[in-house]
Amino acid sequence: MAPLRGAAAQLTAPERAHALATVWAEARYNFAYWDRVRVDWDSALRVNLKLAAEPQSDLLFYRRLRRFVALLGDGQAAVLAPPNLRSRIARPPLLLTSAARRPFIMDYAENDEMRVAHPDRLAEIVAVQGVPAEAWIRDSVLPETAAATPADRWQRAVAWMLQGEKGTSLHLLIRVPGGDPRGLSVTRSLSLNDRWPLDPPAFAVDSLPGGIAVVRIGSLADADVVRQFDRTYPDFSAVQGLVLDLRGAGGVQTEYAYQILSRLTDQPFSAVRWKTPLYRAAFRAWNLPDSAMTWYGPAAGSVAPRREHPSYGGPIALVASSATSGAAEDLLAAFRTTGRGVIIGEPSAGSVGDIATFALTKNWGVQFSVTRHSYADGTEYAGLGVKPDVLVVPTVDDLLSGNDPMLDRAREYIKGGTGRQ
């Protein structure tokens, strides 16, 4: 989500209070998963109003507001800081991942500092600023991390564990496999306004022996991913098996998920079902449930195959992880109803729904889910994730040895589906 436009000045105490009250009210009446909120929302507001009255920087208020919003348990919820504040929030150009709740350096983007420091790929971060990594993540990062499931919350926290004020330095203690720990100093140099150079592409293709195509989708936020899919596969004459890798996929455009899936079947399939809170003030007078229990939503529809290109009829495996979120989860759910193949990997992030953005003060904003998605029969996967047909959880040994057990299991399934040994 792009930041709201315009300049912003330091917030005053009344403006901080107004921002908090707006978040409280908008979430109370518009958040689609209100029944999943496990905190006393009113009490959280009172605590944060007291904190907001203290003299503080916008950066500190941003962190406190993130903690408040994270209480919703929605992986699509976020505080949208104004551009001038975004320029002050940064992280080093290190790509981090979590394996067995342990943070590892996967890659880095070169700059002057990185060329000298030369971080070891696959090195584990043992400590940050002298604090054990697990304690650093648990105490400093998790409370500000919005997510719907514990697994997704942890992997998000690891990815952003080095974020802080731009220009400040961090001392890391890292350890390569079989080696002794060593120190590594890095600077928070890439701000939220900068392009993150380590994002995977939104669409990429690889191949495995036997005509098995691996399509990796990193985002369903732009129609170009559908165009790239169609350009790559005007037909599927050379494809004997297809693995659709959604492990890092996000985005909120479910329509793009349907357009891809409608190339993988020649039969109509059930769309996911959606509903949104319906607030009726008169219900308060009658002591009846309000928006937490009253909904507007159409009946579940269906999606027809696309006819402008040939459909693919061979074996398919979808690969998912705890980071698979948003429209990619809707793709998983719709795929399951087609009966076209299996889902392999981990339960997805459980953060689905259309996002609304609400303006706060001085160009601040907040966003969260305002629609509730489920299977066509009403079974929900928000807060739970879409469960895989074949559970595969990579280990630390897999990471360090370069193994990809999810992809290996998908390949085994495809080979069985094509009758090859």
Image (cartoon, rainbow, N blue to C red):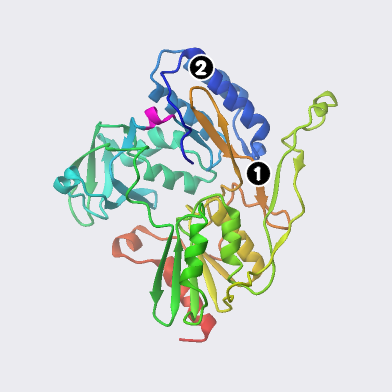
Can residue 386 be seen here? The reply is no
* Kind of element beneath mark 1: loop
Can residue 179 be seen here? The reply is yes
Residue shown at 49% from the left, 58% from the top: 224
Q: Where residue 389 sits in the image (x, y, percent)? A: 57, 66
Residue 247 vs 11, above or below: the answer is: below
Q: Where residue 51 sits in the image (x, y, percent)? A: 47, 17
Determine which quarter of the picture holds residue 154.
top left
Judged left or right of residue 73, residue 83 is left
Judged left or right of residue 375, residue 111 is left
Q: Where residue 402 sits in the image (x, y, percent)? A: 31, 65
Q: Is residue 84 magenta?
A: yes
**What residue is pinned by disc 2?**
15
Q: Where residue 260 sits in the image (x, y, percent)? A: 56, 65
Asked if the residue under mark 1 is in contact with the one under mark 2, i.e. CB atoms within 8 Å, the reply is no
Q: Residue furthest left?
A: 116
Q: Quadrant of the C terminus?
A: bottom left
* Residue 371, label in figure: 1
Determine which quarter of the picture holds residue 331.
bottom right
Please report the bounds of the magenta region as a residue range. Answer: 82-86
* Kind of element beneath mark 2: helix
**Circle 2 residues within 10 Å: few <14, some 14–19, many ≥20:** some
**Circle 1 residues within 10 Å: few <14, some 14–19, many ≥20:** many
Residue 266 vs 385, above or below: the answer is: below
Residue shown at 35% from the left, 41% from the top: 134
Q: Earlier in the sequence, mark 2 or mark 1?
A: 2
Residue 110 vs 12, above or below: the answer is: below
Judged left or right of residue 246, residue 121 is left
Please state which of residues 118 and 278 is positioned toward the viewer in this rendering: 278
Please state which of residues 215 and 48 is positioned toward the viewer in this rendering: 215
Q: Is residue 274 magenta?
A: no
